[in-house]
Amino acid sequence: MSPPSETDDTQAFDETGDPVAKDAEDAGKDPRDEPTGPRVGPDGREIVVPFRLYKAVTVFSTLAAVVAYLIGFTLIDAATLQISFVRTTIVYLLNSAGLYPSDDLLVAVLAITGIGFLVAGTAVYVLGTRFRGQGMGKPQGDSSET
């Protein structure tokens, strides 16, 4: 960790506790003043939102995607294994309701439902990545990064 420079004696923070940059070129403009809404960025269509909302969208879309993946893989596992806790529970509940599905039908329904959860999890994650916080992702004109 580098020692603090003499010119950087204090760091400014916004109301969410995030640091606010204090560059010479950005002294007159605050990145949080960027207009919000949909636009076309360098990586395709994106939606600019306040940073606090961006953090919430990122956390919850990733959480929803992970849960959907876990459910999807669990259902696919139940479709392929004859001795699975999930499959046994589903068969028990269906038999209790008076339904006796054939093994082929049960495998097909579990597999299709599992794949559906995987696709839904992917869609949620991809849509969550389309959001961008105010001041994020602006191109650096004089930067050597690509």
Image (spheres, rainbow, N blue to C red):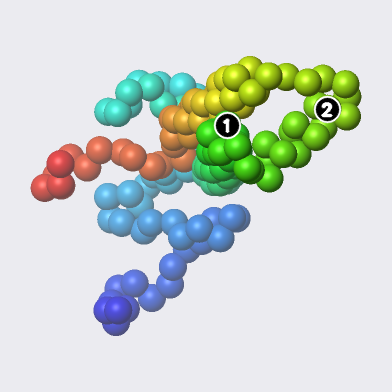
Give residue 16's position: percent from left, percent from top.
Answer: 59, 55
- Between 32 and 29, the one nearer to me in the picture: 32
Q: Is residue 107 left or right of residue 42?
A: right
- Residue found at x 46% / y 40%: 133
Residue at which label 2 appears: 95
Tell me the quadrant of the picture where the C terminus can be found: top left
Residue at which label 1 appears: 79
Q: In the picture shown, does residue 106 fall above or below 5?
A: above
* Amino acid on which disc 1 is placed: Ala
Q: In the picture shown, does residue 117 fall above or below 146?
A: above
Give residue 26's position: percent from left, percent from top.
Answer: 33, 49
- For the view shown, which residue lies furthest in the right direction? 97
Q: Dividing the picture into quarters, in which one does residue 90 lie?
A: top right
Give residue 106's position: percent from left, percent from top.
Answer: 65, 23
- Between 42 and 118, the one nearer to me in the picture: 118
Tag 2: Cα neighbours inside 10 Å, few (<14), some, or many (≥20)? few
* Amino acid on which disc 2 is placed: Asn
- Residue found at x 78% / y 21%: 100
- CA gap, disc 2 to disc 1? 17 Å
Give residue 88's position: percent from left, percent from top.
Answer: 72, 39
